Image: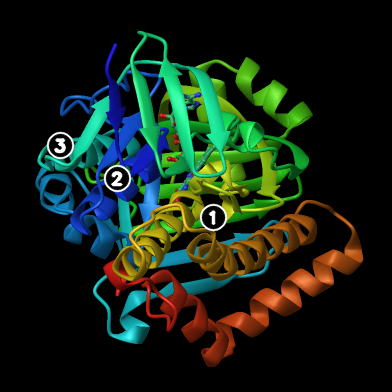
Amino acid sequence: MAEHRADVIIVGGGMVGLALAAGLADTGYTVAVVEARQAPAWRREHTSNRVSAITHASRRLLERLGAWEAIAAARVSPFEAIHAWDAAGHPGVTFDAADRGEACLGHIVENTLVQDALRAAVGRRSNVSLYCPVTVDDLAIEPDRVGMRLGDGRRLRADLLVGADGARSMVREAAGIGADTRDYHQRGIVATVTTEIHHGAVARQRFLPTGPVALLPLADGRCSLVWSATEERADELEALDELAFSNALTDATEGVLGVVIAAEDRAAFPLRRLHANEYVAPRVALVGDAAHVIHPLAGQGVNLGFLDAAALVDVLAEGRQRHGDAGAYGALRRYARWRRADNALMQTAMDGFHWLFSNNDPVRAIVRNLGLGLTDRLVPAKTLFVDHAVGRRGDLPSLMR
Ligand SMILES: Cc1cc2nc3c(=O)[nH]c(=O)nc-3n(C[C@H](O)[C@H](O)[C@H](O)COP(=O)(O)OP(=O)(O)OC[C@H]3O[C@@H](n4cnc5c(N)ncnc54)[C@H](O)[C@@H]3O)c2cc1C
């Protein structure tokens, strides 16, 4: 069977891999995307329980790649503020888009919709080939090229292999890159919930000793739930029928939106942290969850992945002008330096939050109350947070500025 030659092979056609493929194609590279799974399509009549809070920087990326228009036309939910509080009776802190002259802090979007729109955007680019659904059977990473045989017998060859294949990355393993992993001993329970009171375009999160519970506003007035809970608490919650679960959620959110009337499509995911020891190896780069997995409490996972993808596009675009080799190690190192420190900082911040809130220890409670109390009054800290959320930062890749 003939061998297909591309400049870059991306293993993993999730949100991050597809965004990278479209971005690289626009700089002139030929790209092959290999995806093992036929992802479920977005459905107008059903709101998916897997959503992401997309920052303005990520939205700008999706706009430039030609994916946002379809997303916005289908279903998005802008949120204007975030309110966070804890179980110790403190009033908490509100981050408001209006404080920085913005209409909203970001958008809640179903993952299936983002994926569909990116797949369509990739399909419009003649220099991207999508191989899906198919597995990678044989992978050879050589000093001057990479080659693979797919499950259907086809062969691919390229200058660079990118692992966008999620937390259990096969590419990471094949490249011999280790990872620092930590089990949070929590599960994230997701569901689509109906509440008595309308969310008013505010994302809400309450920190409980057993983990944070978040209600993200949806376009139809319902909320998407992300309830992170210790394994014991998650076992209890998962065993409840819908009515009892809804009641438990009303209690956990202190009835902030009145009574929780329904909680449909419940599912649970184990929560782990992972950081690859290296983001690159000769002829290999990692992006998205293949490089880092963080706690969902700040809803940043895919946003960090999009930052990786856009940064890799910048670095490879420059490399192409200089020497034309997509796998040049110097360019890859530049990508790693740019993104690894940034992601490590975000992971550390999430771990700090997790440590601070996941306990009833009185000292931590005092620190929490002081922290939250101060933050609500400390304008520069709030400004910094909101600027991060709306994507006003100095080091953004060009596709996200
Ligand atoms: C409960 C929960 C809530 C979350 N909420 C948010 C949020 O609000 N905001 C946010 O930004 N993030 C959130 N996240 C994180 C976010 O979902 C992930 O960071 C994001 O999906 C990662 O995208 P990715 O494309 O890097 O990886 P994935 O989505 O894991 O995609 C990897 C792709 O690679 C494919 N693949 C894997 N192995 C192979 C192989 N060997 N060959 C071919 N293909 C392969 C898979 O089929 C998949 O399509 C949340 C996560 C959880 C668990």
Residue 391 x %, y %? 37, 73
Q: Nearer the viewer, residue 90 or 185?
A: 185
Q: Is residue 210 left or right of residue 308?
A: right
Considering depth in this image, is 183 or 166 the residue closer to the camera? Answer: 166
- Label 1 to label 3, Cα distance in Å? 34 Å
Residue assigned mark 3: 120
| Label 3 or label 2, whichever comes before in sequence order | 2
Q: What is the quadrant of the C terminus in the image?
A: bottom left
Identify the mark at residue 21; answer none if there is no mark. 2
- Labels 1 and 2: the sequence-earlier one: 2
Q: Secondary structure at mark 3?
A: helix
**Residue at 24% in and 24% down:** 41
- Residue in front for this viewpoint, 238 or 337: 337
The answer to whether mark 3 and mark 2 are in CB contact below 8 A is: no
Image height of 299 relative to 224, above or below:
below
Report x, y in % for residue 86.
66, 60
Give the class, few, some or many, for how many residues have Cα within 10 Å of label 3's Cα (few <14, many ≥20).
some
Q: Nearer the viewer, residue 52 or 226?
A: 52
Q: Nearer the viewer, mark 3 or mark 2?
A: 2
Tell me the residue that label 1 is attached to.
205
- Asked if the residue under mark 3 is in contact with the one under mark 1, i.e. CB atoms within 8 Å, the reply is no
